[in-house]
Amino acid sequence: MQASHDTHDHAHGDHGDHAHHGRAPGLMGWFTTTNHKDIGTMYLWFSFVMFLVGGAMSLVIRGELFAPGLQYVSPEFYNQMLTLHALIMVFGAIMPAFVGFANWMIPMMVGAPDMAFARMNNWSFWLLPPAAILLTGSLFVPGGAAGTGWTLYPPLSVQMGLGMDMAIFAVHILGMSSIMGSINIITTILNMRAPGMTLMRMPMFCWTWLVTAFLLIASMPILAGAVTMLLTDRHFGTSFFNAAGGGDPVLFQHIFWFFGHPEVYIIALPAFGVVSHVIPAFSRKHLFGYTSMVYAIAAIGLISFFVWAHHMYVTGIPLTGQLYFMYATLLIAVPTGVKVFNWITTMWRGELTFETPMLFALGFLFLFTVGGLTGLVLAITAVDIQLQDTYYVVAHFHYVMVAGALFSAYAGAYFWLPKWTGRMYDEALGKVHFWTSIVFFNVAFFPQHFLGLAGMPRRIPDYATQFTDFNAVSSIGAFGFGFSQLIFLWVVLKNIKGGEAAPVKPWDGATGLEWTLPSPVPYHTFEDPPVITEEHLAAAH
Amino acid sequence: MTKDTSNQFAGLKTVLTVLLAGSLAIFAGVAQAEWKLNLQEPVTDLARRIYDLHTFLTIFVTIIFVGVFGVLGYSLVMHTRKRGHKAADFHDNLTVEILWTLIPAVILVAIAVPATIALVNQRDTSKADMTIKVTGYQWKWGYEYMSGDATGIKFISVLSTPRAQIENKEAKGENYLLEVDRHLVVPVNKKVRILTTATDVIHNWSVPAFAVKTDAVPGFVRDAWFKADKEGTYRGQCSELCGKDHGFMPIVVDVVSEAKYAEWVAAQQKEMAAAADDPNKVFTLDELVKRGEKVYTTNCAGCHQPTGKGVPPAFPALDGSAIVKGPKERHLAIVINGKPGTAMAAFGAQLNDADIASVVAYERNAWSNKLNDVIQPAEVKALRGK
Amino acid sequence: MSANAVENTNDLDTQRRNNRRVGILLALFASAVFVTVIIRQWVSGGA
């Protein structure tokens, strides 16, 4: 096994020394770096910045919804905010965050010196900022950004202005970045594992990413195809989605959700992976049911391609279609349940302590289960018809996505921060961050279940007065949740500036190769493959 | 916030308690106007069936949640380092794993049975007593009675909440954003089949009390049905993002007795006969502008604004517009046929000749467009279909 | 570099070749999905 940055060096012999030092000095170093740790760091910072941008947009939404009537923004701008909030959070914040974790951790976890394609890795990151500029910049072009919701349904999206084209190109670029990142991750995991690190001995995070990367490679081109057809419908006179020209607007929804449902698991699976590391570490036990976890992940990944039309129960798909998609959706609850039971059994009869990473992992488990169970309610087609396109759905997917993905990303960040920076973070601040987050999150989103049940549609800038009180509560929660996230920024900045030095293994229950490396980890690791012993394995056998 | 673990559990317990209390409140069906916690009161058999199914599911998932987190809660309290618990060493148990795969699978099958029955019932639109075609426009609903005595009655239903209430310049009325100028009227205890379609973008016709929610897709027809067994006024909203005024196109349905329905039908037919304009009537400029202003306020002001300034570039200004100040044939053609790929609808399908003539005349004479043009319905008629 | 540089170079070449093979295969798969989605709609009379 050898380093691919060494590959790079052999190809350009005169750079022989380069690999053994850090990146080039200054800003140029960040532009040209091919080091997986540098790139991981950039992904994580990028995603946090986008998270704050998308979060600010959500506060515009919640600010407007604090009281009935139009107060601050026009309905057009409101629609643009909700569209960009979703696109930025999904493609700009959550996905890059987990790609950042993958870049940092996967080579260290499998005992590889770097990612398989180090230069392509650089490129997949540097595609993101232009895409982000296209998305946010579309707010400032005539007509503003796309106001269609992140689902970009035609014919509404055909009516939009230049902002829509910018969003389409941004999606293309983000898709390319994701596909390149996935190719890199799959190749690294399949080809670069240290001797003795067999697939079934791999840490769970690598397993979740392996499945996720396959989902990405299979689903991102579908989205790219859908938006390409949208683009030609808009500008080149095709009628893929135009009934007047023989097309079908609902066809777009089928294609979009054929991408969109795997996308949900693209976000959730790496989150499952992170939690599968944090919970055993703070339970001082091995992950329960490693093998069944791996099968559950694979099953979830596979089934996720066969449930897409449960997002489309009210579009008039045939009865047989509705029945099939209902059964398939119920089926996906089985492997998801297995995972939750496995995590809980991992904690059972453990030796639990509750440092910040563990708190966030427990928060994840709690909120994700709420979101999963409301998902079960929504899966029942007849009931979904009452709840589709209401705030119940908004509450459901925020429980799954924000709580599921964001809380798990925080669990991972606090867990591995000492390894990355070589210093312990401020535990008290971390706990404040957790408790404010989970309380305000529930204040913001739990009442939305009631709004949805009472019939408040989603994506409206103003509402009937009977919805006033819960909306006010929800807005207060959203602002509290939003500002709580700045605590995390404070924790990280404080940690970078100083703090107590972290030992090689700051968490006594942690297992895995990454904890055999010094803190902070050296710029280059595992240039010679490590010898894998039983105690290094995250999974028990 | 402290390092004391017991306090952390207090937090978790509080969250759990709040959640449990919230769920119990759902079952109790607390139906206060301001803090409404459950689905709207159903008035059809199907909606009641769905209501019960939802109640069952909610209780069921709450039990699962409490059960699962009860076990976890026990572990979180008892199996801690603080209590001196030592970690056991086990990490596999095939029996347990098979059990917790199979048991949920069996439970899900049990849920799927009533869910399937309800759904099959929901989609059975056969043997309807009457049919109404519902057309979604940006941003209003068109209704047309397709069968029975009411055949031929058609009208457009638009939000009637005054702009001033939306802009917070006036106190909000009782049915703020849920009121329209013309209600859909249907008889009680009759199976009403709804056909939905749209002309511009996808809308969704939804009335929660009937458990009806069906997309209105341009170029396609979808159907749904309801059989309301309680007289009253029921309100819903468009449930698919359809652009700027998506939040401002409510649905109001009056369910009335058979006798009252017959009365309503007769009154509608009389009104329609009276309102039918003599196609050869010649209007004066004043008549046109007066009538046109009303048509403009209902149909055009949403985008082009009462000031005619529009919201460029999505909704162009009419004040000083080259099209409005250009040849009237071109102006009329755009109003009649719309502009594909934009929110400009083909009003030829929604308005009669006199309305189109007057609104175009109004636009050509309002604001700074003082063209003094007179347009007669006959001119509109001549241009239709061209 | 470690002492057994010659061995490693051999490994490295194999490694690079294998990586490239997997990478190209995956990229082809992604392109095929993209093209299929559009062609499928095209032949079904969409455009």
Image (tube, helix red, strand yellow):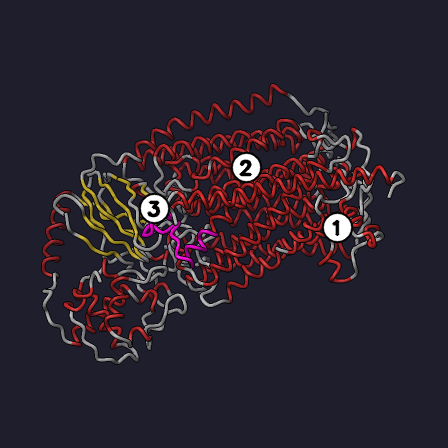
Labels 3, 1: one chain: no
> Would you name the residue on which mark 1 appears?
A35
Residue type at the position of mark 1 = Asn
Q: Does A260 appear above or below A477?
A: above
The answer to whether residue C36 is left or right of residue A202 is left
Sequence-wise first label, 1 or 2: 1
Q: CA distance from mark 3 to mark 2?
A: 30 Å
Marks 1 and 2 in Cβ contact (< 8 Å): no
Image: B24 above or below A157: above
> Mark 3 sits on what residue?
B215
Tell me if label 3 and label 1 are in contact, CB under 8 Å.
no
Answer yes or no: are tags 1 and 2 on the same subunit.
Answer: yes
Q: Secondary structure at mark 2?
A: helix
**3 vs 2, front mark:** 3
Q: Which residues are magenta?
A: A228-249
Q: Residue at x 18, y 76 (%)?
A: B374
Report in which chain the residue with disc 2 lies.
A
Q: Position of residue A42 (x, y in %)?
A: 69, 54
Q: Is residue A245 magenta?
A: yes
Residue under the point 65% across and 33% down: B76
Q: Residue A187 has which mark? A: none
Amino acid at circle 3: Asp
The chain under label 3 reads B
Closest to the camera, between mark 3 and mark 1, is 1
| Numbered tag placed on residue A369 in the rendering | 2
The front one of A121 and C14 is C14
Distance from Cα at disc 3 to Cα at disc 1: 50 Å
Residue B62, image x and y in percent? Answer: 49, 33
- Dot 1 alpha-carbon crowd within 10 angstroms: few under 14, some 14 to 19, many 20 or more: many
Q: Is residue B11 toward the left or the right of residue A454 in the image?
A: right
